[in-house]
C-alpha cells in the first residue's frame, strides 16, 4: 500500500546533499525534520566555534529563536501553528545552555502560555553543521 505524502523544502543546499525533506504530511500528521538556526540563505545565526562543547547562552538563544522561526514557516506552509504541535525533540551540544534559555524562547512561540506538547531534550557532542548548537524536530497534527 502506498501512502500519500505532501512534502516541503526550504531549498537549502543540505536538503539535496543529504536527500531529505523539511516536512512530510501524511493524512493529518505533520512530521518536521530537525530544524536549526539558519537564515533563508543557509547561513547559521550566531555560529559557535566548531567543536565547542560549552556554549554562551546568547548563542544558544539566538540559534534557538531562529530554529523556532524556521519551524513556524514550515507549520504555516501546512496551515498549522504551534498550537498543532504535539511533540518536540531538542538536540543541544550544551544541554545546560539549552535548558537555561528554552522556557523563555518557547514562550515566545507558544503564545506565552505553557506549551501543551511533549518534549524530550537530549545532549549531543555535535550536530550536522559547523557552529550549530541546537536542532529541534517536531510532530504536529492538523
Image (cartoon, helix red, strand yellow):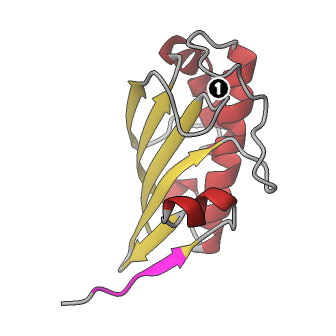
Report the number of numbered marks.
Answer: 1
Locate residue 64: give its quadrant.
Answer: top right
Q: Image point 49% across, 17% down: which residue?
A: 95
Residue 114 image position (x, y, % from top left): 51, 35
Which region of the structure is painted magenta? 3-7
In the drawing, does residue 4 fall left or right of residue 1?
A: right
* Mark 1, secondary structure of its residue: helix
* Vertical arrangement, residue 125 with respect to residue 132, above or below: above
User: What residue does disc 1 label?
Assistant: 104
Locate residue 62: give its quadrant.
Answer: top right
Residue 73 image position (x, y, % from top left): 68, 61
Q: Image point 59% across, 44% down: which residue?
A: 110
Depth check: give the residue in front, 58 or 110: 58
Residue 128 image position (x, y, % from top left): 54, 39
In the drawing, does residue 97 fall left or right of residue 62?
A: left
Q: Is residue 111 visible in this depiction of the protein?
A: no
In the drawing, does residue 62 fall left or right of residue 116?
A: right
Is-magenta flag for residue 79?
no
Depth check: give the residue in front, 87 or 38: 38
Q: Image point 57% across, 61% down: which residue?
A: 17
Residue 94 image position (x, y, % from top left): 53, 16
Tell me the crowding category of disc 1: few under 14, some 14 to 19, or many 20 or more residues within 10 angstroms, Cα based.
few
Q: Main secondary structure of the magenta part?
A: loop
Q: Image point 64% across, 13% down: which residue?
A: 55
Amino acid at each position: 500500500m502506498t501512502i500519500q505524502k505532501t512534502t516541503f523544502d526550504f531549498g537549502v543546499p543540505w536538503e539535496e546533499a543529504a536527500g531529505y525533506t523539511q516536512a512530510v504530511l501524511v493524512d493529518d500528521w505533520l512530521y518536521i525534520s530537525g530544524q536549526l538556526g539558519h537564515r533563508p540563505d543557509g547561513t547559521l545565526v550566531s555560529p559557535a566555534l566548531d567543536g565547542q562543547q560549552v556554549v554562551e547562552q546568547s548563542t544558544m538563544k539566538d540559534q534557538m529563536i531562529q530554529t523556532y522561526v524556521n519551524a513556524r514557516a514550515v507549520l504555516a506552509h501546512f496551515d498549522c501553528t504551534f498550537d498543532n504541535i504535539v511533540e518536540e525533540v531538542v538536540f543541544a551540544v550544551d544541554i545546560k545552555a539549552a535548558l537555561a534559555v528554552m522556557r523563555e524562547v518557547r514562550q515566545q512561540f507558544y503564545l506565552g502560555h505553557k506549551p501543551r506538547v511533549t518534549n524530550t531534550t537530549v545532549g549531543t557532542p555535535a550536530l550536522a553543521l559547523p557552529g550549530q548548537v541546537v536542532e529541534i524536530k517536531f510532530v504536529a497534527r492538523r
